[in-house]
Amino acid sequence: MATEQPTHGRTTGRWIAGVILGGAAVATIVPLVWMIMIAFQSPRAIIAPDWEFDFSLDNFAEIFDTDAVFGTQVVNSLVLVLAATALTLVISAFASYSLSQLHWSRRTVLVVLTLAGLLQVIPPMTLVPGLYVTLLNYDLVGTLGGLILLNTVFNLPFAVIMTKFYFDTIPGELRESASIDGAGELRVFRAVMLPLAAPGIAAVAIFTAIQVWNEFLFGLVFTAGGREAPITVGIAALIQPQEIKFGAMAAVGVVTAVPIVLLAVVANRQIVAGLTRGAVKG
């Protein structure tokens, strides 16, 4: 009997965990499926008192009409994601490599990582007034360049911390061997260390891209909306005091949410493997 109790306890624990995970999956998937169904319904069927599915592409035709701004906003978001992610990866790769492999003092590394961690917990809203004045002085308010810089700054601390931990898993002897063979520091970084850290950097890139794509506050505050804004701001603009365009909002949601959800699902193993290997030094 004593040997059966732990087994029974593990079975119960797995059952409870399965129920919780199943409930979380349902709570996540059902709204997404419902949004997709609304996006492909005609406006008449959406507001009909009785349930009916009237397949239609009218909602997508509306948001991608030549007079609409949603197509431009999608392009803005794509440019924003590509530029901010690339800039974040370049800076974080050099910074984290330096902190991990170039023998900085423990105090210096601790101070840098502490400051990076503190920036992550500061609510961005509290920094908006100062950021707005700064961007205004450099004529970057209402521009993609300003949004790219802001997203880079706020995603850089996490990228530096995670990439640094990943570089920590690479033996320093590899760098020393390449240096003895006559390779300069930049060549060692580019040809030896960077390829070994590629899985971790890829995981950070995916996470950063998702964060930038979903960002709403900066787009709302630092642009005037319309063709200057990212698509997240465009979705919010569909909620008006006089009318809520459910069909158009669902169609924009499908265009913006489904691709990023598919990216997260496809790259899930890469994200978990990269982040866990970097977080736990082997």
Image: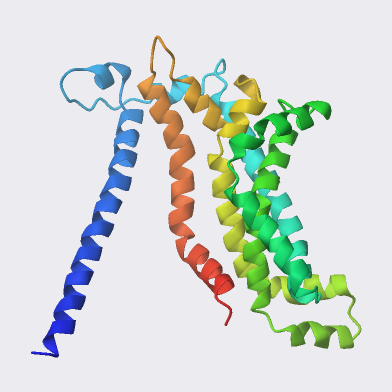
Instruction: Look at the picture and state if 17 lies above or below 142.
Output: below
Quadrant where the C terminus is found in the figure: bottom right
User: Looking at the picture, how far across and down is residue 75, in whole percent?
Assistant: 62, 33
Is 156 left or right of 264, judged from the image as shown?
right
User: Looking at the picture, how far across and down is residue 208, in whole percent?
Assistant: 60, 51
User: Looking at the picture, how far across and down is residue 40, in whole percent?
Assistant: 33, 29
Instruction: Look at the picture and state if 150 lies above or below 42.
Output: below
**Which residue is drawn at the image coordinates 48% and 37% (left, top)?**
256
**Which residue is drawn at the image coordinates 53% and 32% (left, top)?**
232
The part of the image, by quadrant, that contains residue 184 is bottom right
The part of the image, by quadrant, that contains residue 12 is bottom left
The reply to whether residue 75 is visible in this rendering is: no
**Nearer to me, 5 or 281:** 5
**Which residue is drawn at the image coordinates 51% and 24% (left, top)?**
64
**Nearer to me, 270 or 208:** 208
Number of numbered discs:
0
**Nearer to me, 98 or 57:** 98
User: Looking at the picture, how far across and down is residue 151, in whole percent?
Assistant: 66, 43
Instruction: Look at the picture and state if 129 lies above or below 172.
Output: above
**Which residue is drawn at the image coordinates 62% and 36% (left, top)?**
126
Is 14 left or right of 175, judged from the image as shown?
left
Instruction: Look at the picture and state if 32 lies above or below 43.
Output: below
Q: Single out the residue that lies furthest toward the left.
A: 1
Quadrant where the N terminus is found in the figure: bottom left
